[in-house]
Amino acid sequence: MAHELPSRPCPLFAPRKFAIVASQYNPRYVQGLVDSALSELSIIAPGSPAAVWHVPGAFEIPLVVQEIASRGLADAIFAFGVILQGATQHAALIAGSITDRLHQTSLQFRIPVLHEVLLVQDEEQARARCLEPELNRGVEAARAAVRILSTLDSLRNA
């Protein structure tokens, strides 16, 4: 696990379209990711719209991400959810399935999908990654999105 956030990238020159797909499960933590990402995007991607789509739980995130990607509704898509590890393997199965599908969608549609569906051990880990500024994965995802969009722009214009 990283112990600090990556530095803030240079802001984008032109507005881009972002989409956020957020689970309604564990809403306090997921909303922390959404709010943090939107706040960071306002600084590093000024003037860029960000649509937020809510889904019932983490398992439903890949379907909506795929729909957004297939329709070309965004230049980058954020997947936000929090899965608390329980006593069974159910959480790990869900997390693995989500990871595989998000990765496939990103490659199939050649669009950045920022995977922040977090599998955490307890609420302390969720709080640190979703609500606290030091390791906030919403901020990290926003910074990664701007960096990958800049890299893809460079490649596509080469």
Image (cartoon, rainbow, N blue to C red):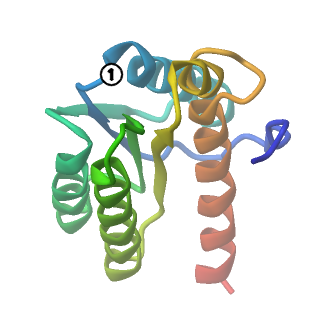
Give coordinates of residue 150: x percent, y percent.
67, 61
Query: Which residue sits at x=25%, y=62%?
Result: 72
Query: Dot 1 corresponds to which residue?
Result: 26
Query: Which residue sits at x=80%, y=43%?
Result: 10
In this view, the residue farthest toward the bottom is 158
Q: Amino acid at mark 1?
A: Asn
Q: Is residue 111 left or right of residue 58?
A: right
Give coordinates of residue 13: x percent, y percent.
67, 46
In this orientation, which residue lies closer to the viewer: 101 or 7? 101
Q: Is residue 113 above or below residue 37?
A: below
Q: Is residue 110 left or right of residue 27?
A: right
Q: Is residue 44 above or below residue 73?
A: above
Give coordinates of residue 131: x percent, y percent.
58, 15
Name the secondary structure under disc 1.
loop
Task: Tell me if mark 1 has few (under 14), some (14-19) or many (20+) residues whose alpha carbon lies within 10 angstroms of its own.
Answer: some
Q: Is residue 30 left or right of residue 73?
A: right
